[in-house]
């Protein structure tokens, strides 16, 4: 039996496997300037896109605007991400401890 090797070359800030036709990406963010785009070198507004360091660390968030941590937790039944108040992750959000 002959084996066929399939190589998929999709570059961006989101890593994973699957076909683009049946894959849903939500709440995906990467640090601005670290790659050319989230999926196939493009960002997908409100789905997979870049954020600045200040945005990810919730620095100077305008009043009435959801924090980055709130966006990460959107759609979750419980809080998964919390602010890094003890600088364990250089100010970037961390997973909530149980």
Image (cartoon, grey):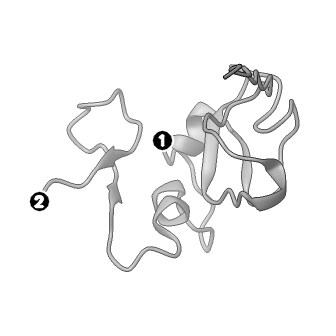
SS class of the residue under badge 1? loop
Q: Residue at x 80, y 28 (%)?
A: 10
Question: Does 84 sit left or right of 68 as displayed?
Answer: left
Q: Nearer the viewer, mark 1 or mark 2?
A: 2
> Residue most toward the left?
98
Q: Residue at x 24, y 55 (%)?
A: 96
On-image quarter of the N terminus: top right
Disc assigned to residue 57: 1
Question: Does 69 sit left or right of 85 as displayed?
Answer: right
Residue 97: give x, y in percent of width and height: 15, 53
Q: Nearer the viewer, residue 19 or 30?
A: 19
Q: Nearer the viewer, residue 56 or 35?
A: 35
Residue 28: give x, y in percent of width and height: 62, 49
- Circle 2 crowding by C-alpha within 10 Å: few under 14, some 14–19, many from 20: few
**Residue bearing mark 2:** 98
Disc assigned to residue 40: none
- Circle 1 crowding by C-alpha within 10 Å: few under 14, some 14–19, many from 20: many
Residue 57: give x, y in percent of width and height: 48, 41
SS class of the residue under badge 2? loop
First reached walking from the N terminus: tag 1 or tag 2? 1
- Identify whether 84 is placed above or below 64: above
Q: Nearer the viewer, residue 59 or 81?
A: 81
Q: Residue at x 55, y 63 (%)?
A: 71
> Residue most toward the front?
1
Callout 1 touching callout 2 (CB < 8 Å): no
Q: Residue at x 72, y 57 (%)?
A: 23
On-image quarter of the C terminus: bottom left
- Identify whether 28 is placed above or below 86: below
Q: Nearer the viewer, residue 29 or 20?
A: 20
Q: CA distance from mark 1 to mark 2?
A: 22 Å
Question: Does 1 sit left or right of 37 as displayed?
Answer: left
């Amino acid at each position: 039996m002959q084996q066929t090797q399939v190589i998929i070359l999709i570059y961006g800030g989101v890593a994973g496997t699957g076909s683009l036709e049946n894959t849903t990406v939500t709440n995906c963010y990467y640090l601005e300037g670290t790659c050319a785009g989230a999926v196939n070198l493009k960002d997908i507004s409100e789905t997979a896109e870049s954020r600045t360091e200040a945005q990810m660390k919730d620095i100077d968030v305008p009043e009435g605007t959801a924090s980055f941590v709130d966006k990460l937790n959107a759609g979750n039944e419980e809080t998964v991400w919390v602010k890094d108040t003890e600088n364990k992750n250089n100010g970037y959000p961390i997973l909530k401890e149980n």
